[in-house]
Structure formats: structure tokens, C-alpha cells
Amino acid sequence: MNVLVLVVDDERDVEDLFRQQFRRELRAGLFVMEFAYSAADALARIITPSDVKLILLLSDINMPGMTGLELLPKVREIRPDVPVLMVSAYGDADTRAKALRAGAAGFFYKANRFPAAERRNCRAAEYISNQPVRMIHHC
């Protein structure tokens, strides 16, 4: 059975960034990565039966319609077994605190488009190799 990392972001160019960032892991078949371009699309994806096991959801915070912070409790209700990492281009501490209080397993910034420190600390592959998401340093 394949395992799935679902990325939720309304900016379509983010797909290329994530695929580039995790190219080694994707090539090695450690997981498959799918993209939802809205919170509504993400909710539809996680409730649809599939032959891949969803193991991690990465969600942008600022999206039109339903925000990532509004999506978070819905995902936690439907799939409490799936950790949710929040992603934001904005590094304000208040938003980070709100996300963590709402049940996010972690938070990282995409402002610098995956600098080296974020690559080391926020890789989905680290989670897949049994490192608990809560132990990943929040960049």
C-alpha cells in the first residue's frame, strides 16, 4: 500500500516547489504526493476511499474561501489519525500559536521557499521514517 502526503495550497506553483523539495523521496517511492487547491477539495479528497493511506496533510493558512485554520478542525474531526502541518508565507507568532492551539502537529514557513534548515527539520520523509511530527522543529 502506498502512503500519501496531501498538500493543500491555492497557489498552484507551490506544487513544483514541493515536488522539487521531495524529489528524492518521491523517486524512491517513499510516499506519493497529491495536491488540493482549496480546503473544500482537500476535504473531498480525505473522505474519498482510496488505495493509498493518508499519513500527513500540509495546509497553507491563507487561502480564499475556507482558510487553513478553518480546515484544521474539520480534518481533525474526520481524520484524527492524520497529523496536519500548517504552512505559511507569513511568520507571525500569533498565527503560529493559533494553529498549534487548534491541533496542528507543526508549523513551518514557506517564505524562503524551503531554506536548508527547513529541509532538515520539516521533511515529510522524516515523519515517514517514524520520527513523530511533534518532534520536528518548527522552522
Image (tube, rainbow, N blue to C red):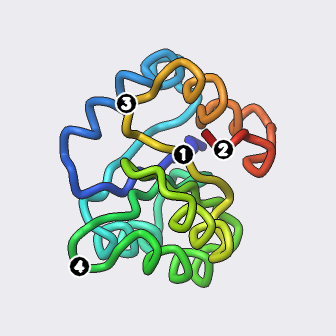
Disc 2 target residue: 138
Question: Mark 1 — residue?
Answer: 108
Front-lying residue, 89 or 81: 89
Location of the C terminus by quadrant is: top right
- Using the numbered discs, state the Cα–Cα distance from disc 1 to disc 3 in whole angstroms: 11 Å
Q: Which is more N-terminal, label 1 or label 4? A: 4
Q: Position of residue 108 (x, y in %)?
A: 54, 45
**Residues marked 4 and 1 touching at CB (< 8 Å):** no
Looking at marks 2 and 4 on the same chain, the residue that comes earlier in the sequence is marked by 4
Residue at numbered disc 3: 113
What distance separates the C-alpha of mark 2 from that of mark 1?
A: 6 Å
Q: What is the spatial separation of the Cα atoms under label 4 and label 1, in whole angstroms?
A: 22 Å
**Residue type at tag 3:** Arg
Judge the density around disc 3: few (<14), some (14-19), many (≥20) Cα neighbours within 10 Å: some
Name the image quarter holding residue 127: top right
Label 2 – label 4 distance at C-alpha: 26 Å
The x and y percentages for residue 22 are 47, 25
Marks 4 and 2: in contact by CB < 8 Å?
Answer: no
What residue would you read off at disc 4?
Answer: 65
- Residue beneath the point at 44% across and 58% down: 59
- Residue 133, image x, y percentages: 73, 47
Q: Which disc is residue 57 wearing?
A: none
Q: How many marks?
A: 4
Tell me whether the residue at label 2 lies in contact with that at label 1, contact meaning CB atoms closer than 8 angstroms.
yes
Q: Quadrant of residue 123?
A: top right
Position of 110 relative to 83 (above/below): above
The residue lying at 56 percent from left, 25 percent from top is 119
- The residues bearing labels 3 and 2 have C-alpha atoms spaced at a distance of 15 Å
